[in-house]
Amino acid sequence: MSIMANRFDEDAGVVTRTRTKKKTKRPPKFRVLLHNDDYTTREFVVSVLSTVFHLGETDAVRVMMHVHNNGVGVAGVYTREIAETKVAIVERLAREHEYPLRLSIEPEENED
Ligand code: TYC
């Protein structure tokens, strides 16, 4: 949230704006979504959730089962570059194991 006051500079004929409230600098966050398929093994998904997304065994199994039952689920929430890097790492791992596992990224709506 920012408040801007307009001022007219008479010498130069230029309108300047003065920001009176300090801009809070929180970078946008992005959800990394995991998508279900019929071929990737449950064990592989749990291992990715634990090694790449740092979930404990219980949460990793819970997220994997949520995706298995609902089609899609959140693996984690990160800034854009970290989210994109994790997607690239998991996609490479999946292809190496010849799994069709898919991931995507979506912006988290701002909460302020
Ligand atoms: N549906 C897969 C199976 O039954 C398991 C699975 C879960 C696959 C989550 C992908 O993102 C996924 N083997």
Image (tube, rainbow, N blue to C red):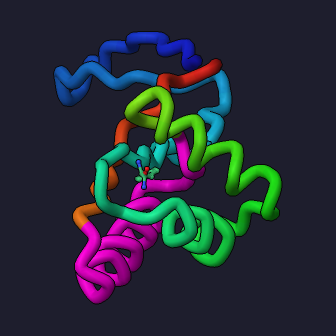
Relative to 105, say whether 96 is above or below: below
Left or right of residue 92, residue 44 in this image = right
User: Which residue occupies 81% across, 63% down?
Assistant: 56
Relative to 82, say whether 28 is above or below: above
Q: Nearer the viewer, residue 73 or 29?
A: 73
User: Which residue occupies 70% across, 44% down?
Assistant: 62
Q: What is the x, y in percent for residue 108?
A: 48, 31
Please indicate, yes or no, whether residue 77 appears anywhere in the rendered image: no
**Image quarter for residue 106?**
top left
Q: Nearer the viewer, residue 89 or 94?
A: 94
Question: Magenta segment, principal secondary structure?
Answer: helix
**Image quarter for residue 10?**
top left
**Residue 93 magenta-drawn?**
yes
Q: Nearer the viewer, residue 105 or 65?
A: 65
Left or right of residue 25, residue 59 in this image = right
Assign the N terminus to one quadrant of the image.
top right
Q: Which residues are magenta?
A: 74-99
